[in-house]
Amino acid sequence: MKRRDGGPAFPGQQEIARDGKWNQTWDCGMSLRQWYKGMAMQAWITVLATRSEHKGYSDEGAAAEAARLSEISANLAVTTELTDPEGK
């Protein structure tokens, strides 16, 4: 079963160009799940970096924990987006 990733984070563009020709740019790039994970990683690194002195994390331990928490956060964000796209 293919993992649902929320589709492309920044989908391509379709339009009629200035010269009157049809323009379709499609490079799906990163998935929405990957984008959410990157955003969550920034937040978790900030939180863990400020708390690492108190929790006894090494830099590597804090980074590993940030990666683990980012994956969980991204999965939750994409699942929520797919099941309740209007945020109700």
Image (spheres, helix red, strand yellow):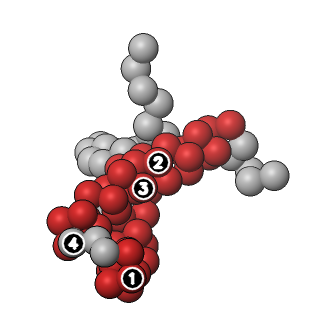
* Residue in the foreground of this view, choosing between 69 and 15: 69
Q: Which residue is the site of mark 3?
A: 69
Label 4: state its secondary structure: loop
Do tag 3 and tag 2 residues touch (Cβ < 8 Å)? yes
Q: Which residue is the site of mark 4?
A: 58
Label 1: state its secondary structure: helix
The three-letter amino acid code for the residue at tag 2 is: Ile
Q: What crowding class fits label 1: few (fewer than 14 Cα within 10 Å), some (14-19), or many (20 or more)?
A: few
Numbered circle sitting on residue 72: 2
Q: What crowding class fits label 3: few (fewer than 14 Cα within 10 Å), some (14-19), or many (20 or more)?
A: some
6 horizontally vs 29: left or right: right
74 horizontally vs 77: left or right: left
Do tag 4 and tag 1 residues touch (Cβ < 8 Å)? no
* Residue in the foreground of this view, choosing between 80 and 57: 57
Real-space Cα separation, disc 3 to disc 4, in angstroms: 16 Å
Q: Residue 27, located in which quarter of the rendered image?
A: top left
Label 3: state its secondary structure: helix
Q: Position of residue 16 (x, y in %)?
A: 39, 52
Q: Where is residue 5 in the image (x, y as percent from the top left)?
A: 44, 37
Q: Which residue is the site of mark 1?
A: 54
The three-letter amino acid code for the residue at tag 4 is: Ser
Mark with earlier residue (1, 3) = 1
Please name which of the two marks, 1 or 3, marks the residue nearer to the observer: 1
Real-space Cα separation, disc 1 to disc 2, in angstroms: 23 Å
